[in-house]
Image (spheres, rainbow, N blue to C red):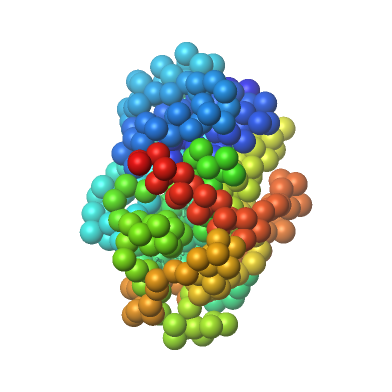
Amino acid sequence: MNVLVTGGAGFIGSHTVVELVNAGFSPVIIDDLSNSSITVLTGLKNILGFDVPFYQADCNDFSTVESIVKKHDIQGIIHFAAFKAVGESVQKPIKYYKNNIGSLLNILEVMQATSVQNLVFSSSCTVYGEPDLIPVSEETPKKKTESPYGNTKAIAEDILEDVIKSGENMNIISLRYFNPIGAHDSAEIGELPNGVPSNLIPFVTQTAIGKRPKLVVFGNDYDTVDGSNVRDFIHVVDLAKAHVAALDLLKTKNGTFYDVFNIGTGKGNSVLEVIQTFEKVNGLKLNYEIGPRRAGDVEKIYGNVEKASKILNWKTEKTLEESLKDAWAWELKLKNNNN
Ligand code: NAD
Ligand code: WQD
């Protein structure tokens, strides 16, 4: 099956491309490189041994996406392409609504025009906002989040549900990711954010390597095990494999199918536990200090992942220790490449 991977040069997309090939799918990438580098393609080639078809294009461009879908006889789409910086989305909501909602609508129109049936959409645990009860399951009510970014994911899910309710001949799965971290164990691909990272792990590795003077832990006065926030940190390769499982399920459906799955480890770890584990598994000391809370942070969240385990026949295989070792190996590789 030929699968279009929008945002396939990005962090999760690039790891998914590898797992698609491992599972016998043929991926084709569209990415405008707005938050990724062309060098990702070299990493992919080093892992896979061949060039994955790549188009530098904007997913909002109907005729370009349509022509790529037709040219490659695409039968499934995984739509990763989106902007994801929560803080920036508060400053630039129009940019976020336009790209994240606009590109999804465009992909749906291309699917209609070309009769592509299968879509996997990148959603997020951000749709749960600050949950009243954890772990959150797919039945946990969605809550309006404080960020336009979070809203784009909640709105996108509503759009997809409505499309299927209308009787559209499509099969769609939204995967609600928790916090993806780590890198491919070859260290050929990993997380490569443009500019100052806002996510925890790239900030940790960049501090450890000396690119940043210190890490600030955003608060230690939460009602958690050690006062720092708790998250469900999932290895990006495990997350990538969930997309293969989702496509495998979609292939068995005959249209008008929609479902949503939590994709996490089912366990919570605090920010301070992550720092201590990072130091331990990599044998180093991290320069960090406790700072004030970050506006908008959820106190604690992790997922109930029973549904994905039962229906997608998927579960995580990698540990927090492996994730943090792989993230560090990737940072070291980046340093060597730049020297
Ligand atoms: P990423 O920024 O590394 O990857 C997204 C890719 O999409 C980038 O390569 C970017 O250049 C590309 N892109 C953006 N807009 C585009 C457009 N209009 N046309 C073509 N390409 C475009 O992000 P990621 O961490 O890999 O996230 C992938 C998806 O998963 C996103 O939809 C994100 O919102 C979602 N998600 C991410 C996380 C996370 O913590 N990383 C958690 C939950 C959900
Ligand atoms: C993790 C924890 C921070 C940086 C975001 C989005 C969410 C989803 C995943 C896409 C938090 C703490 C961080 C630092 C810190 N993305 N931290 N110092 O906030 O859980 O979720 O990414 O959908 O929508 O909101 O991820 O990696 O930013 O933070 O102490 O320098 O690390 O406070 O507790 P977050 P994150």
Q: Quadrant of residue 306?
A: bottom right
Residue at 40 percent of width and 71 percent of height: 287
Residue at 66 percent of width and 63 percent of height: 266
- Is 95 displayed left or right of 192 in the figure? left
Against 114, residue 284 (above or below) is below
Q: Quadrant of residue 322?
A: bottom right
Residue at 40 percent of width and 57 percent of height: 209
Can residue 124 be seen here? The reply is: yes
Against 40, residue 123 (above or below) is below
Quadrant showing the N terminus: top right
Camera-nearest residue between 310 and 181: 181
Quadrant showing the C terminus: top left
Q: Quadrant of residue 25?
A: top right
Residue at 54 percent of width and 16 percent of height: 73
Where is ligand 1, by quadrant? top left
Q: Residue 307 in the image: x percent, y percent?
A: 70, 55
